[in-house]
Amino acid sequence: MAMTTTLARSDAERSGAHGRTAELHAIRAQALAGPSEKATAAQHAKGKLTARERIGLLLDEGSFNEVEQFAGTGRPASAWRTRSPTPTV
């Protein structure tokens, strides 16, 4: 019976991990898509370029790898941690 409980817990953890992974993929796709058309239009109306447009003008194509794609998603970095750090004794 203990084995069934362990398997059930593993299944629950797996489905939670799959759900979290799917959520992260969706957020990453949204981040890669960039700002909405409305936000881009607002920037252009102010005579400004979007951040990606400015980077595109400054750097050679393919020379820039974007990191921290979740910045600006409205979630603190701690929200992406999947487990707590192991406490030291």
Image (cartoon, rainbow, N blue to C red):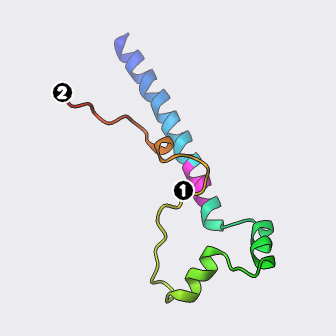
Q: CA distance from mark 1 to mark 2?
A: 33 Å
Give the residue drawn at x 49%, y 70%.
Answer: 66
Residue 84 falls inside the magenta stretch:
no
Q: Earlier in the sequence, mark 1 or mark 2?
A: 1
Quarter of the picture holding the N terminus: top left
Q: Residue 63's spot in the image, x, y percent?
A: 45, 83
Q: Is residue 7 above or below residue 65?
A: above
Give the residue drawn at x 66%, y 67%.
Answer: 34
Secondary structure beneath disc 2?
loop
For the residue pair 14 and 44, the one nearer the viewer reads as: 44
Q: Residue 77's spot in the image, x, y percent?
A: 48, 47
Q: Is residue 29 above or below residue 10?
A: below
> Which numbered disc covers residue 89?
2
Give the residue type that dot 1 points to. Answer: Phe
Give the residue type that dot 2 points to. Answer: Val
Q: Residues within 10 Å of mark 1 (few under 14, many from 20)?
A: some
**How many numbered circles does the render carry?**
2
Q: Residue 25's spot in the image, x, y percent?
A: 56, 54
Quarter of image, res 70: bottom right
Q: Is residue 80 above or below residue 84?
A: below
As drawn, is 57 to the left or to the right of 78? Answer: right
As drawn, is 11 to the left or to the right of 38? Answer: left
Quarter of image, res 32: bottom right
Q: Residue 43's spot in the image, x, y percent?
A: 74, 74
- State the predominant SS element of the stretch in magenta: helix
Quarter of image, res 31: bottom right
Residue that label 1 marks: 70
Residue placed farthest to the front in the image?
A: 46
- The range drawn in magenta is 24-29
Q: Is residue 48 above or below residue 42?
A: below
Residue placed farthest to the left in the image?
A: 89
